[in-house]
Amino acid sequence: MKKSKRIILSMISLSSFFIAPVILSSCETKNKKIADLLNNENENTSYHLKKNKDEDIKIKETTINKSPIKEQTNTSSNSRKNNEIDSNNIPKTKENETPLKINNHSNTYSSPKTKNELEKPNIVSSEKSTNELNKIEEKIESNSTKIEIKDEETFKIHMSDEEINNFYPIQNVSSLQPTSLSFDQVKDRIINQMYASNYYEHPNFILENKTVSLNKKIEDNEKIQLKLLDTKTKKAIENVRWFQRIRYPHDLILEEDKDSSQALIKLSKNGIIEKKKTPEANKNDVVEVWAEHQGYLYRTMVKIGGEDTIRETYEQQQARNKAKEIVKDWMHLPLLQKIIKAHDWIIENIQYHDTKDIWKDQSAYSALVDLKAICTGYAKAFKMLMDELGIPSSIITGSMDQSLYPNYHTRHAWNLVELDGEWYHVDTTTDHIIYQTNKRKKNNKISHKFFLMHDKDFGKGNSYFNYFEKRMGQRFRNFKHLEDGSFVRNKEEAFAQFERLYGVQDNEQLPKWLDLYGDEKLFEEIKNEFETKGFKPKQAIIVRANDDKTWKMGYRKFRFEFDNEDLKNKSNKEQINFKVEKHAELVLKVIIENKKINDFKLNSSNFIVNKGKINEIKDFESGYLVYLDHFEDFGKNDIKLDIQKFGYKFNSNSNLIQLNVNKHQTPSANLKTIGSNRAILSGVTSGMEYRNNSEEWKEITHDHFEISNLVSGSVSIRYKSNENQLQSDIQKIEMPMADDIDKQIKVYDNKIIGVDSMMEYRLKDTQKWIEIKSNQIDGLKKGTYQFRTKAHNKTLASQIYEILIN
């Protein structure tokens, strides 16, 4: 189980403070300590905290005594906000964590106000009569059993609407009180450590962006205009004063159009910011910019990229532009053809070149723009092309043994790509090296040896972790590298390939031998299968040496030679007539005219089509339905179908059919998040499917479809293939998690400060979240309260943080 962080802050006095060391403990140990802590603080209440299936939760215990809290240490893990597959194909999922807990003892008192402090801006509050709350407090105190919260709708304390209204304090947002502030007053409020950053805000106004980035070179003259907006109209406010705060080497507040040698940015009167200095290569900086309007203050954070960030941002954009240019002529192609085109372009255009400089040979830029890279650059380039084509893919790393020397292993990077819901390996680096070797031998054929592979196809000595191990594909395994149907997984597939190849119409065209590929352990099984069915091979061998197709691979080549004269005598081809009709745009109807299909059995390998791939066949009373997909192009396709089976001759005068091949339109669904792990999909219908990040696809049955157990990252939607249309391209909706609030929320003067209208709270174990309307909450009764940033639009609610009020 993943360990979570627990930070204990000691008492903070007005003149000094001490922070205890960070302690790592297992989830079980931590929960026990939390329960013990709560039992000691409140004899009538015992909580047993467990993983919340619906919500991600943290724990932070803070003891507050005789002094307000200063800025809290952030224990959140920002890595949770991106759940895409990482380089080792492990999707980041919810951590097993418990809530942030702030213990607010009743003896906490307020600190003296600063000389320029406004009178309590935006107070929320007023407590109810104690008698009105007896019933609720009895429910809280009687809750002495162990609690397991299963989801947002599961709760221990049941409260009616009337009880809810009586329990929570009334939130009164104070009216706007315009005030004129001097520079010194503004300065005092900005540098005051006692309050949350939004303490002096008023909800009538809001910054357009609370975080912006300057990641370009100074000479690029990158400028960003900051705006303070009217909350209701979203129009920019005039007469705003702007200030920047510099913290190092000492606190310094600069007005707009003022400069200092310490300043990293230029701040103009109209809120325009631009970079003045570039941080060191491996360093990024952050500058606070404050807007002041009518006596209220609003903060935005300006992230300033260092030299490495500038270079990475520039090269990433250039690589993305190049990728768009490369794939523009492939966008009309079917899915499989897009993957082939991307693989082949990289093989032909990028040179393997090791500079020993990670900036020069391990990026998508080095591969796509400079056309020189090592394996990491190849893998990043392939993934970027897949991203532009809308095809799910990933980068995987491991130890590979592909050299001429025995047991020589090297670190390597390559890709995984998804096709029809299954995953395959694609190693463009190794295929390029083989291609270059072939060219030196005057053979310009592109290698597909490491294209669409299974885990089992790698040779011995390779080591890596594949998250998709149980979802690896079989259907297209090695199909470009090995002859169609020659790679077999069992004896049945081997005999089906024999029947197809030796079932040619003319006995004079029988193959000289049958080459198959598969696991070496299958060889004896296949040979015995031929003998059992009366086709004893004249010679059967495993080809081990001098075989380019199987060198360093996890499969072997089997060669079976038969007595063709004997096969001619056994064939005695029975004449069978058939015809082909169009059952649907992607389905052929094969009618057997003079024979019942029960008299002989056909499988998909007996049917041969000149275009497309056979997905499956289904028999009916007088024939078969043949389902096709993965054509080389959309539009009208003239399909010719033949049947081959040993001992039979299939004749047809009507086996050519024209199909109009098209795919579904890309969905245009909408997503609305609910809480921390649920959402509603609208603009959807049956016949579609969805998934969260790279998990398995799930069916959608109706519009306004609720999906649950989500983690931050993305939600993808697509139409499934049916008899008339192929699956659509994927619509991908980004779904981040709201920002954590553990560095924002504080307890001051027996009030909760640092909250805002984007948050909500509730008494722990109750069903209803209460919207927060201002930046302070006063008058809370005894209990443990949970706070979070609420879900909005396509953003999930943040992790939960708890405050214990005694």
Image: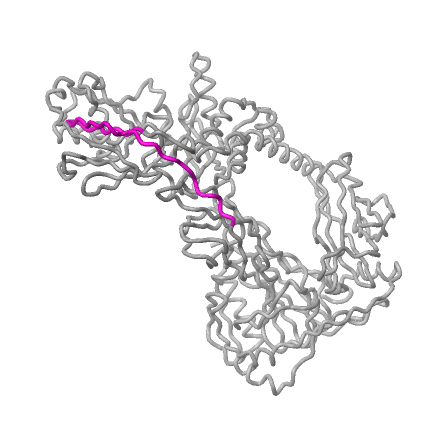
Horizontal relation, residue 521 to residue 9: left or right: left
Q: Is residue 110 above or below residue 351?
A: below
* Magenta stretch encompasses residue 305: no
Q: Is residue 406 visible?
A: yes
Say which of 217 and 337 sits in front: 337
Q: Position of residue 714 (x, y in %)?
A: 52, 49
In the image, taking residue 335 as reference, residue 72 lies left or right, namely right
Number of numbered discs on residues = 0
Depth check, front residue: 712 or 597: 597
What span is colored magenta in the figure?
Answer: 640-668
Q: Residue furthest top?
A: 442
Q: Quadrant of residue 285?
A: top right
Examine the rendered structure and indicate whether residue 663 appears above or below residue 562: below
- Quarter containing the C terminus: bottom right
Residue 102 is drawn in which quadrant? bottom right
Residue farthest to the bottom?
131
User: Would residue 708 be seen by someone viewing this image from the given angle?
Assistant: no
The percent coordinates of residue 465 (x first, y second) are: 44, 40
Q: Residue at x 51, y 32 (%)?
A: 382
Residue 745 location (% of width, % of height): 67, 64
Residue 296 rendering spot, x and y as whole percentages = 80, 63
Check the image and report above or below for 277 versus 24.
Answer: above
Instruction: Answer whether residue 651 is magenta in the image.
Output: yes
Q: Give me the residue at 87% from left, 47% from top.
A: 257
| Depth check, front residue: 26 or 685 | 685
Q: How is the image coloured?
A: one colour
